[in-house]
Image (cartoon, rainbow, N blue to C red):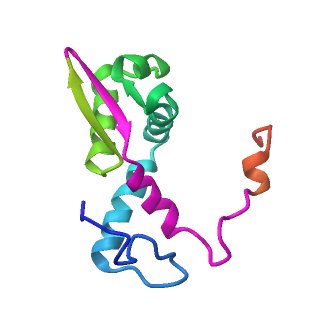
Amino acid sequence: MSNRSSESGACCSPLARAPLTEDWAGDLARMFKALGDPVRLRLLSLIASHAGGEACVCDISASFDLSQPTISHHLKVLRSAGLLDCERRGTWVYYWVIPSALQQLSAVLLTEGGPVVPSEACTATEVPA
């Protein structure tokens, strides 16, 4: 993943304000593609919301009806996209979200007027049939 700094403005320019460079669009596309899978999106959410902001793979595996190799594959995709980092501690691997990656994804989608107000879809209590 390319190194972006907020000083250049590239990581903080909303789509409506300035066109993306080819490299920057490629980096963002890899991150969005990684999040396009429901399992990976849930994994990211579980890790980000876990106490202390990091989670052992042993803590999150039970949340899925998937084999350990499949979970490891999804975690590898998230790491390759620059969304997660990890560290081995004994026999377990601990994962955490890279905050700057989430900031880049959210910053590029901001509208000129500031934060987007949640739609009814975000506040709905029932899933439409």
Question: Residue 44, percent across and down?
Answer: 45, 39
Count every numbered label the image shows and give the total.
Answer: 0
Looking at the image, residue 12 sits to the left or right of residue 2; the answer is: right
Question: Residue 94, percent across and down?
Answer: 31, 26
Q: Quadrant of residue 52?
A: top left
For the point 27% across and 74% down, the residue is: 23
Q: Quadrant of the N terminus?
A: bottom left
In the picture as drawn, the residue positioned furthest to the front comes out as: 7
Question: Residue 34, percent across and down?
Answer: 38, 50
Looking at the image, residue 109 sits to the left or right of residue 90; the answer is: right
For the point 43% across and 84% down, the residue is: 19
For the point 35% across and 22% down, the residue is: 56
Q: Quadrant of residue 79?
A: top left
For the point 39% across and 55% down, the residue is: 100
Looking at the image, residue 126 sits to the left or right of residue 30; the answer is: right
Does residue 104 show up magenta in the picture?
Answer: yes
Above or below residue 91? Residue 18 is below
Above or below residue 54? Residue 114 is below
Does residue 15 show up magenta in the picture?
Answer: no
Question: Residue 27, percent across and down?
Answer: 31, 64
**Nearest the eye: 22 or 107:** 107
**Nearest the eye: 67 or 78:** 78
Above or below residue 1? Residue 75 is above
Q: Quadrant of the C terminus?
A: top right
Q: Which residues are magenta?
A: 90-118
